[in-house]
Amino acid sequence: MNSPIIKNTTIKEIHLASTQGFCAGVASAIEVVERALLKFGSPLYVRHHIVHNTTVINDFEKKGVVFIEELKEVPKNNTVIFSAHGTAPSEFEAAKVRNIRVIDATCPLVTKVHREAVRFSQKKVQTILIGHKGHQELIGTSGYVDQDLLHIVEDEADIDLLKLDKTKPVGFLTQTTLSVDDAKQIIKKIRETFPIVVGPPKSDICFATTNRQNAVKELASYCDVIIVCGSPHSSNSNRLKECAENEGVESYIIDTVSELDLSWLDGKVIVGVTSGASVPMKIVDEVVACISANSNAVKVSQDENIESSIKFPIPNI
């Protein structure tokens, strides 16, 4: 005879962060790939992972999408999609030389940072780029800055190492998926260190990143533990985990429901569930269903998603 399933008797509520599912930039990039598959068929080449989510990438690979890192992997006279994270101008030129058609799926909010970078360089402004070295977005944005003017910092300590001319203007740009609080402190130190700071007036962190971090802070005010749905290589997902921990709440990041360890919920009463901007809603639903199935009389709540009406235009395919 099978033993009865022992359910968690302490969990009473599951609260979903108000912002869930794909952000507008991710939704747009994914639709670009879907439309291109319909038009061109497979194999369809995409430079770098279109978004940083394992489930999304695996699903596309099953449909015949080939993710590459170098343009030389794309046959001549073919088509390539550039990812949502943005791509340096040199890659567009390289594609042109090999007669490769480019479909640009860069998030419009990242493109906005690229335009700011170009303006700074045209005006010979010393440019501090705040972000995570090696991240695809930072690499792409770096390509729009005159290399003689470019200085990359990851934290406040890096500012002390900068050798900039304090008699000349200094501008700053930020990766769009940073911690809002960390970026605010770095920008504050830039303004305190250099006498002529020309902006922008605030960081370039995107609304989706900001909204999700604010939602986590809200969850942290009444939750005992917070589960973050997101891939380990996703910058904005990792920032959500850090955000919860900075608020003093235990937090775990999982790629799929199979990684959920129910022992994390032992002794907890209210569980918060949030997700990164590139996480399919089905993963969040599976996590909620798993917690509910292994608990007694759980109430599930979520406030209205303030991003539900935001859409970005799709480039011509």
Image (cartoon, rainbow, N blue to C red):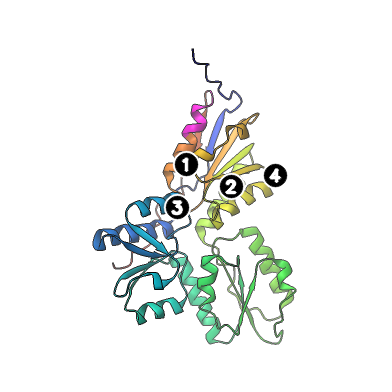
Q: Can residue 23 be found in the magenta stretch?
A: no
* Main secondary structure type of the part rendered in magenta: helix
Secondary structure found at label 4: loop
Secondary structure found at label 2: helix
Please name the residue shown 44% across and 70% down the image.
70
Secondary structure found at label 3: loop
Q: Which residue is label 2 attached to?
A: 216
Q: Which residue is label 4 attached to?
A: 248
Judge from the rendering whether residue 139 lies leftward or rightward of residue 266; answer left or right. Answer: left
Mark 4 vs 1, N-terminal side? 4
Say what amino acid the circle numbered 3 marks. Answer: Glu
Q: How many marks?
A: 4
Q: Nearer the viewer, mark 1 or mark 2?
A: 1
Q: Which of the image's four quarters has the C terminus?
A: bottom left
Say what amino acid the circle numbered 2 marks. Answer: Val
Mark 2 vs 3, N-terminal side? 2
Please name the residue shown 55% across and 65% down the image.
135
